[in-house]
Image (cartoon, coloured by chain):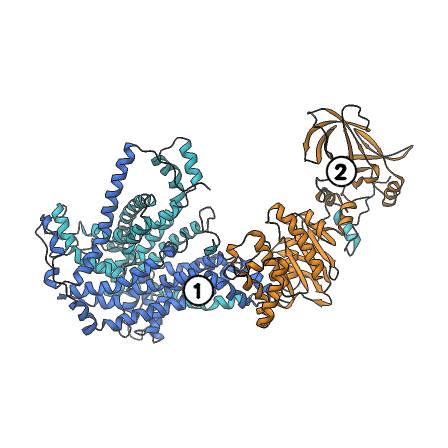
Amino acid sequence: MASREIAQYPSASRRVFGVVTILFIAFYLLWTLLPLLIMFLSSFKDLLDAFQLPATGDWGGVATLFTFEPTTKHYENLFLELNFGTYLGNSLIASLGSAGISVVLGSMAAYSLSRLDFRGKNHLFFWIISTRMAPVVAVLVPLYAIFRSLDLIGTLPGLILAYTTFNLPFAIWILKGFFDNVPYAIEEASMCDGSTRLQALRMILPLVAPGIGAFLVLCVLFGWNDYLFSSIIGSGGAKTLPPATIGLVQPQNIQWGSIMAAGAVTTVPMLFLGVLIRRYLVAGLTMGAVRE
Amino acid sequence: MTDQVVGDTGRGSRGSARLAAAEAASPSGVRTIDYTPQRFNPTPSRRYYFYMMAPSIILLAGISIYPFIWLVYMSLHTLGEAGQPDVWNDFKNFTRFATDGKFQQGWLLLIKYSAMCMVLEVGLGVFLAVILNRSKLEKFLVTLILMPMMMAPIITGLVWLFLYNGAFGWYHWLLQSIGILGATSVLGDSDIAMFGLVAVDVWQWTPLITLITLAGLKRVPQDQLEANMVDGAGPVRNFFTVAMPNIYPFLLIAVLLRFMDNFRFIDAILILTGGGPGDATNILPVYLFDVSFQYFKLGRGAAVALTLLLVTIVLGMLLVKIFEDPKRKIKVHGGDEG
Amino acid sequence: MVEVNIQNVWKYYGKTVAVKELNLKCPENSFLAILGPSGCGKSSTLRMLAGLEHISAGDIFFGDLRVNQLPPKERDIAMVFENYALYPHKTVFENMANPLRLRNVNREEIDKRVRRAAELLQIEMLLDRKPMQLSGGQKQRTAIGRAIVREPKVFLFDEPIAHLDAKLRAHMRGELKHLQRRLETTTIYVTHDQLEAMSMADNIAVMHEGVLQQFGTPSEIYNHPANEWVAGFVGEPPMNFLNCRLERGADGVVAVHPSFRLALTDAQRRLLEEKGAEAEVRLGVRPDTIAYRAGAGSGLGIAAKVFVTEPLGGDMIVEVQLGADRITVKTKIGPSANLDEPCTIAFDAARIHLFAASNGIAYF
């Protein structure tokens, strides 16, 4: 195989391009990271500091962004007075629970779809993924009716089930790709060795485990970041972080400090998870169509 | 010498007369058999697989088929007040689309919004990917760049609401200082609000396009690039004639996915403008949300939802077509075993 | 340890037929090779024997036991796969121990038997490695090891050495045959390589397009091919075929070709009469039974022209233009000839084959 690098020859245009490149990356990083930075900084600022802005056109005034007395009072407010500990727990339980259920049920279905051929398989497959593509707003009302008749509104099991509605089809779709990549011969070899079908399936599970693990994380992320379902299905007893944060937006009194703190609390764990499963992110976010 | 044919390979054949007849027609000197067996063994059961699929399918059916039937029913009936039966409404909810300005505008705005997002995200994302692909710091930079994607859309909306704030928002100040923004705030001006929303979507989702393009660029066949260079192409030409056709299918998938997500995720828009000011950012899903959850016109909402669903399904079929196309489906073989 | 008996077996994949009316018997403890080009149904047959594929019609017996409905686990077979199908996450030891573990053999026994098999295959030093770290030959030995630790009733090999390089393949042929003779287990071996089949098997079943073409010992297959296709498939370089016409002359029966007349032996004449042969026949001659001499009028009966010579060290392949036909001759090494140089060749009447032109069935 040839080396990845293609020979390059210096030229004036290439040098200009090099400078443009660096400028562009610098600008893009600033654009990407600034909102996050301001969120974190503001969450440690007293409101008076947070609302400080320099005069229009006063470029030197940018320094005011960084001049403040750090305070953790917004975080204290969240956890000591606003019950965010409970919401954090709800978020964790709901997203982990749903991810777990989706991955277990999804693996079973994906494995079967990967190994079995039958008429109408493609239609079934399309139907499965279309349940994921349906606009949430469109189906929210009937879903609410179903959940209410099952007495699941405002409960954690209800919320887990609600998240599963979008995680499961996604799980089946992606995990099928993982199983497709494991040669069937390995299971056959195992069966010739004297295993039953179920034992043969257990034999290949370690091979798909990394993919399933990364995928589990992605399901957690989707559940954790959800707002519409948790605000409607989870309202009341199973409030999670996103609706709780929205709760801080009150018509007369938007508690910006606490909102920024809540944003940080919601975002930071996901940033770490994102870095953790970076390798699988593209596959995950494109429903397996693109793999790195 | 006679011209009669007598043939029987003799081995393992029962009923040589039948065999001889069958073998008469074999020009290439091969023994052939031209009949089918009379009795087949019973086909084996595949229940095992169906049992494994059943829980998922039942669950998915519950959350997709019932709501769909419900939507159709609701859109075609006027709900009776307390205890009265529902009344067939002669497609009233659908015929009124013709005169429903907000509905039509909602579609137009959705298309306008999506188009702006796509153009900017693809332009920025692809350019960024090309640059990063040549950078030694690729891994590190990509990790930084993908951060916005991890953020809950609702938190994104809140943070940008803060940044756009006319009194203390840093981006408000920045835009005014540069001289782009006049006295109004970004989200308060019906001419600018849409751009404000587009900026948020671009901020959050350009990294996805970049990641996908990077994955595509890694697969551009090196030999094609080299052949093209030997033919006398420069790097720019190389990109457009060799790399671009290779990443095009990936981009198409990305664009379709983003398009459908614009139908699905309105968290950020709900918190940023809620469709305002006026109806300047009242894209269809937001309008649908208002109809169903602000005015509780469930029948009308269902009709609007059905139109949205229809378009989504068409887009989805398109997407699956691309997925299934073996030429475009490029995967790493053998999973993690390489 | 058991006789394998395939009776009237058919395999359908949807509407496509892979195996048609197959009847085969592999005697106890013997080595049967199923030989054929890709797509001939040989792998399907093996997979039906293993229990990995449903048998569409017909029956398979292991001894007196009809195994149609038995899953692989209950058939007491061991199979070696084309791509080895090792468990990538397990060490060589664990790969080989797997069949024993699944049968709840105790720990010391497992250790003993795996080590014995590893010793036999000379892979004792690799027991702690994972398949990723092994070469092709080592993977293949591990796969064989996994098959022999258990002493099954039947060994099934699906092109086990097809992916090794030529040198290793030649070496493994000998080893596999030795192993089979030592373990004395009924073995069915699928291959597309006639060299493997000829050199290792007690019996060969030649298959093409789902149909058994011929079943016999390697010598029967080589010396008495049942039809033109088998004759052309077995043997390297392949047999030459010439269209001839049979005529009864003063000197008995003669095969007439535009370039030569070849008198047949009395034994051959009797066979033709017995079988009521047609006049139009195909004459088959193996390249190594043709005599060749360079130069015009060099003494052999048939005058021809050299198309090209290909020296192979000790031997030489000469392609000879004989009228409109081109035939291959294998001879001892000699000086290379120029294009179109005249030469003479001769056929050994006792060693030719005749096939019916209409259906390819062999007369002798």
Does residue C9 appear in the picture of this structure? Answer: no
Is C39 displayed left or right of B143 in the figure?
right
Question: Is B106 placed above or below C243 here?
Answer: below
**Mark 2 secondary-structure assignment:** helix
Question: Is A130 placed above or below A145 here?
Answer: above
Q: Colour of chain A?
A: blue
What kind of residue is marked 1? Gly
What kind of residue is marked 2? Asp
- How far across and down, in percent of the image, does residue B73 sit? 36, 65
The chain letter for the residue carrying disc 1 is A
Q: Which chain is cyan?
A: B
The mark found on residue C288 in the picture is 2
Q: Which chain is orange?
A: C
Q: Which residue is mark 1?
A: A106
Is B70 displayed left or right of A52 in the figure?
right
Pick out the residue farthest to the left: A55
- How far across and down, in percent of the image, does residue B186 sit? 16, 52
